[in-house]
Amino acid sequence: MTSLARRQFLQLAATAAALPTMSSLAWAESYPSRPVTCIVPTAAGGPQDVVARIVTERMRDSLGQPIVIENVAGATGTIGIGRVPAAEPDGYTLAFSVSFATHVVNPAVYSLKYDAVEDFEPIARVAHSPQLILAKKAMPADDLNQLIAWLKKNPGEVTVGHIGPGSPAHVAGIFFQRQTGARFRYVTYRGAGLAMKDLVGGHIDMMIAPPVISLGAMRGGKIKAYAVTAETRLPSAPDIPTVDEAGLPGLHTAPWFALWAPKGTPRDVITRLNAAVTEALADPAVRNRLGKLALEVPPREQQTPEALRAFHKAEIEKWWPIIKEAGIRIQ
């Protein structure tokens, strides 16, 4: 082969080798070229749906394409979330959920057809909501230590409302019992609002519930709030002490929201989606709307895909032993 021919051959080979990369980069740069579907595994109008719409509406400004919410309810979110791993990993099918439930609790209590860790690409953690330890107005205890003492004196007599086995409130209640040695009976409701109504009416004794459904009743003097299950006080209710301050350190529970893609979604697409999320969460209007729902946005460094992956792993390591020790299984 002549020197000229050899140079031409090497140039052609280099160009051919670069084509897949160039094609991939060009495809990623054009993403998204059409609307993106985001599956929310609950009915329209619920907390997950509301938060998803707040965030994805702002993401449209960054992506240049709408994100269409598709509500797929059923089986505590497993039906909707289960559709995502089966979707084409091209960035056009995403999932948004209270991921504490769908990606931590559900894998521990259900026999799933998908792997909640291996079958998803993390995009970003969006928000979280610490819970409040609440009781009916007639509860004789005035602070958390008194409440725990009263519960221990009345084992198995206290009723606690929640929306079903494996729900955030149910898991938080199990954690509470584990940490204190108290014992109580659960009452299951179709919705947290119905349980709160019965707490206000004095028909049940306690709840562990999100601020968004409980602060109104608390401020109206209709129920008692003993502590927030977080390391810091709520900006929306700074007068309520943390569990650490109230005498039960470490009882931290905060259901959290996150955005996911199918496993194998190109890295450039994940990066583009993450940038759209972080831009949305930096928008004062979005933060204000989330704040009105008593939701807290994680710090910027906690909004990366890598941070979500590490946080997800830590949540599984914390909660799976507690859930499995309690023997919660749903067929």
Image (cartoon, rainbow, N blue to C red):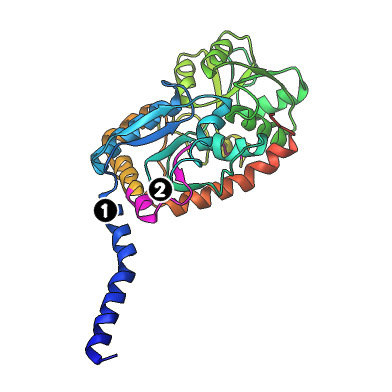
Relative placement, left or right, of 292 versus 154 is left
Q: Amino acid at mark 1?
A: Glu
Query: Residue 84 in the image: x percent, y percent?
Result: 48, 39
Q: Is residue 269 magenta?
A: yes
Taking the spot 35% from the left edge, 29% from the top edge, the residue there is 53
Q: Is residue 136 magenta?
A: no
Query: Residue 87 in the image: x percent, y percent?
Result: 46, 40
Query: Residue 208 in the image: x percent, y percent?
Result: 58, 26
Taking the spot 54% from the left edge, 13% from the top edge, the residue there is 194
| Secondary structure beneath label 1 | helix
| Secondary structure beneath label 2 | loop
Taking the spot 55% from the left edge, 40% from the top edge, the residue there is 103
- Which one is earlier in the sequence, the residue at label 2 or at label 1? 1
Query: Residue 142 in the image: x percent, y percent?
Result: 60, 22
Q: Which residue is disc 1 drawn over? A: 29
Q: Nearer the viewer, mark 2 or mark 1?
A: 1
Q: Which residue is disc 2 drawn over? A: 303
Q: Which residues are magenta?
A: 251-272
Relative placement, left or right, of 77 versus 219 is right
